[in-house]
Image (spheres, helix red, strand yellow):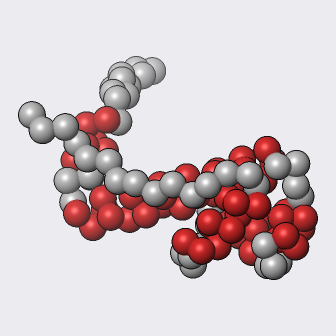
Amino acid sequence: MKTKKRKPYGSPAKFFDELMKDPEVRFYYEEEKAKTHIAMAVRTARLKAHLTQAGLAKKINSTQSVIARLESGEDNRTASLPLLARIATTCGGHLELGFSFKQAN
């Protein structure tokens, strides 16, 4: 019995580079990336402040489910800047917002 030779898998970078040329794909990728960064930032801040989700929620006059949704990164709703600022302040930090751009060639 003859076995088929398998093609070695190459790096997916070329495939993703091509995908990112599509503005719509890029938009949704950046949106999901931002949600993930927000989720990680909220969780990290809460843990640094030694707070539970319920404890943080109480201090910012919200609910535990709101904090859980934020930390999951899967909520379709976008967190407001005032909410994120309250979380940052309550956890002993401050909210920063910025943009980054590719270097000109």
Q: Is residue 68 left or right of residue 97?
A: right
- Residue 58 visible in the shown view: yes
Q: How many numbered marks appear?
A: 0
Q: Position of residue 63 (x, y in %)?
A: 82, 78
Q: Position of residue 45 (x, y in %)?
A: 72, 50
What residue lies at 90% left-to-right and 64% top-to-bottom? 55
Q: Position of residue 28 (x, y in %)?
A: 38, 65
Q: Which quarter of the image is occupied by the C terminus?
A: top left
Closer to us: 31 or 101? 101
**For residue 19, above or below residue 75:** above
Closer to us: 6 or 47? 47
What residue lies at 21% left-to-right and 60% top-to-bottom? 22
Work out which residue is located at the far left of the displayed protein and give it.
105
Q: Is residue 54 left or right of residue 47?
A: right
**For residue 84, above or below residue 11:** below
Q: In the figure, residue 67 lies in which quadrant? A: bottom right
**For residue 16, above or below residue 89:** above
Q: Is residue 83 left or right of residue 1?
A: right
What residue lies at 77% left-to-right and 66% top-to-bottom? 68
Closer to us: 53 or 86? 86
- Residue 71 visible in the shown view: no
What residue lies at 64% left-to-right and 73% top-to-bottom? 83
Q: Position of residue 64 (x, y in %)?
A: 84, 72
